[in-house]
Structure formats: structure tokens, C-alpha cells
Amino acid sequence: MSKNTILVCDDEPDIVSALKIYLSSEGYEVLTAENGQEALGVMNSNPGVQLILMDIMMPVMDGITAMSKIREICNVPIILLTAKGEDTDKVLGLTVGADDYVTKPFNPVELIARVKSQLRRYTQLGSMSGEPKPETGTVSLGGFVMDDRAHSATLDGEPLTLTPTEYDILRLFLHHPGEVLSPKEIYRRVWQDEPFGADSTVAVHIRHLREKIEIDPANPRYLKVVWAQGYKFDCGGGSK
């Protein structure tokens, strides 16, 4: 079995070196880049990259810009490396298409756990070979059709362009129509991790998913808020 390949993009050599040590010790192959432009070059020449650790603040091309360009060509999981005070950048990054973030200075154990979680989800979605996940196959509900084997989703026959996280969230709701799911429960099931700081992360992904499936995201037909409880999916019209 070949090693999982991870791209580390950060302009601080000490951080890159530390990440390379942590990841290599877990058996991962590590590629590196010093800025977003280099990261794009690495992605173009290494289609086998299966996860990206991306800093936000970098010279030449910042992480947000690089990530938006990467999202145009692939849905590989992206974990942002953020400073404690970069809350606005975290939200922007999740909106643009990041799957998760780790705050600097990071705990190596937490970092590796996040990496394994994303790779496990990416593998199970069928983007790589791996063990099937529960409830795998095809699900149809309302105008939605999702095919795990092809990793495709359509709404009223029109293809949806979803990140792996958005795909998993939509898939979760289609398998549990009408059921109210709290942000913490969504995080546990989708990220397969303990929901530390889950509410804001889930909210950003829900908002971005709404922009892709709702005609009017401010007045959603499908993904609705249940005040003080969470979110639920239904196929009827109505208010949030």
C-alpha cells in the first residue's frame, strides 16, 4: 500500500520542519511549499496529493487565494494553519473551501488526529481506495441524488460542486430527513472527532452548502435552523 501524500505549505521553515517530522513519523510522504504559488505548482505536478496543510499569511500568494484556486481543480481536504487572532481568516477560509483548521502553536497529537480524520473521510468517500463507510451507495430524496461510488451529487438533475466536507454534511442530512441534528452531533459524524469549537465551524460549512443548494440561502427550503437545537433537512418550502 502506498503512503498517503501530504503537502505542507508555510513560509516559516521551523514550522515546515516540525510538521515534516510529525507527519513522516506517522508514515506519510511529505511535500513542501513556501507560499501559495509554490503550492499550486506542487499540486499541478503531483496529482496524488491527498491532503494539504495550508498557512494563511504568506508572501507571493496567501493561503486563502491559493486555496480558492486549488478548489477550482480538486476537492482534496485542506486544513488551515492559523494564528490565534485570525478568527476572521478562519471563517473566510472555511467559506472558501477549507475543511478544518488547526491553531498555532499546535499540539502535535491534535494535528495528527485532524489529519487522520480528514484522510479517513477522504478515503471513505471513494476519492481513494479504502473501506466502505456505513450507509454507502446511492440515496435519493426530493430532487437530490447522491452516489458515493462516483462521489457525485445532483439537485434536480444539475450537478453540485461540493467539497468533501460539504458532501458529507449533505449526505448526513439526506440519510436523516426531518431529524434535528445539533452542531456537535454533525461535527462528530462528519469530522469523526470530538466537537471542540464545533458550532462556528459547522455554521460556516452549512452557510456555504446553502449557497450551493438553495435558490435563496437566506430563506432556505432544505437546510433549516431549529432555534437553540441545530439544523434539519426537509424537502418542502418555507422559512428557516
Image (tube, rainbow, N blue to C red):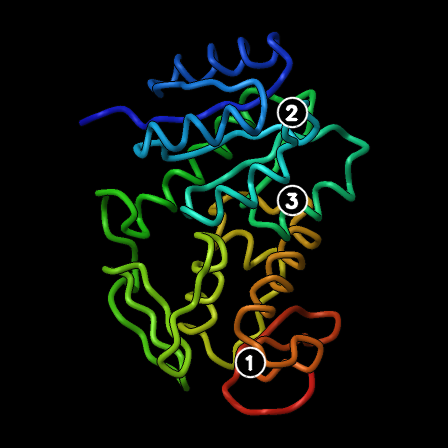
**Horizontal and vertical percent for residue 41?**
44, 27
Image vertical order of residue 231 relative to residue 102, above or below = below
Image vertical order of residue 240 relative to residue 81, above or below = below
The mark nearer the N terminus, 3 or 2, is: 2
Labels 3 and 2 touching (C-beta < 8 A): no
The mark nearer the N terminus, 2 or 1, is: 2
Secondary structure of the residue carrying tag 1 is loop
Labels 2 and 1 touching (C-beta < 8 A): no
- Identify residue type, mark 2: Val
- Viewer-side residue, 20 vs 64: 64
Kindly report which numbered mark, 2 or 1, lies closer to the viewer in this rendering.
2
- Identify residue type, mark 3: Gly
Image vertical order of residue 215 relative to residue 207, above or below = below
Q: Mark 2 points at which residue?
A: 60
* Image disc number at residue 222: 1
**Horizontal and vertical percent for residue 127?**
30, 47
Q: Name the residue under label 3.
A: 93
Q: For this view, does 161 lie left or right of residue 110?
A: left
The N terminus: image quadrant: top left
Secondary structure of the residue carrying tag 3 is helix
- How packed is label 1: few (under 14 Cα within 10 Å), some, or many (20 or more)? many
Secondary structure of the residue carrying tag 2 is loop
Kindly report which numbered mark, 1 or 3, lies closer to the viewer in this rendering.
3
Whole-number angstrom distance, CA of label 2 to CA of label 1: 40 Å
